Amino acid sequence: MAADELVSPELGALGRGLESRWSGAILVCSKCSKKLDGGFGRKGRTSLGKALRKRFGLKKGRKSPVGLIEVKCLGVCPKGAVTLVDTSRPDTWRLVPAGADIEAIGRDLGLEPGVQAPPRRAITAK
């Protein structure tokens, strides 16, 4: 097989392409989230990434309408907040304070509310 046969005409030397449904991506610093030990959600125990996924119905992988990626460290390390980057506006990084309203964050990011899972009920012994 010649080297020319491995090169895709659309992507050049990058090789094959794989389509996704993403209209953009959101990068969330997992180190900041870990330092806060949650900080979001109804009881303040949920990480920012999980709270956004749950509230706006964002799935993992390429079939989600928006990619939400938890990255190792963005290098900002604010106290009491999580660093977030919206790739549609990469020139402005956001510092989201613990306990911030998930609805407001979603509006700022242009996310639409997804289907929420029904609340879990406690299992009681009979």
Image (cartoon, grey):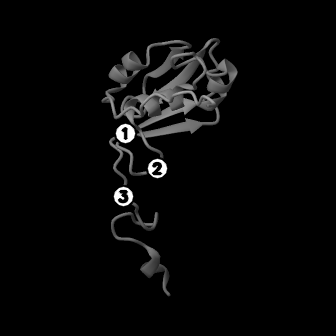
Q: Which residue is drawn at 43% across and 19% down?
A: 102
Picture residue at 57% right of the left edge, 20% below the top = 82
Measured as percent of width and height from the top left, residue 100 is found at 48, 13
Q: Which circle, 1 or 2, is nearer the viewer?
A: 2
In this rendered view, identify the residue nearer to me: 41 or 15.
Answer: 41
**Secondary structure state at the residue bearing disc 1:** loop
Point out the tag, 1 or 3, that comes first from the N-terminus.
Answer: 3
Question: What residue is shown at x 50% (from left), y 34% (from top)?
Answer: 27
x, y percentage for residue 83?
A: 55, 23
Q: Disc 2 designates what residue?
A: 61
Q: Is residue 52 above or below residue 68?
A: above
Instruction: Please report the residue visible at 34 percent of the width from the left and 33 percent of the height from the top.
Output: 114
Where residue 15 appears, x then y in whole percent?
Answer: 45, 67
Crowd rating for badge 3 (residues with CA inside 10 Å; few <14, some 14–19, many 20+): few
Helix, strand or loop for disc 2: loop
Type of the residue with mark 3: Glu
Residue at the far bottom in the pictured view: 1
Which mark, residue 24?
1
Crowd tier of the residue under label 1, counting other residues whose Cα lies within 10 Å: few below 14, some 14–19, many 20 or above? few
Residue 24 in the image, given as x and y percentages of width and height: 37, 39
Cα separation between marks 1 and 2: 13 Å
Q: Distance between the residues labelled 1 and 3?
A: 13 Å
Question: What's under tag 2, amino acid-wise?
Answer: Gly
Residue 63 numbered mark, or none: none
Q: Which of 19 and 52 is in front in this view?
A: 52
Task: Please state if 67 lies on the left or on the right of 23 as rendered.
Answer: right
Disc number for residue 19: 3
Against 62, is 108 above or below? above
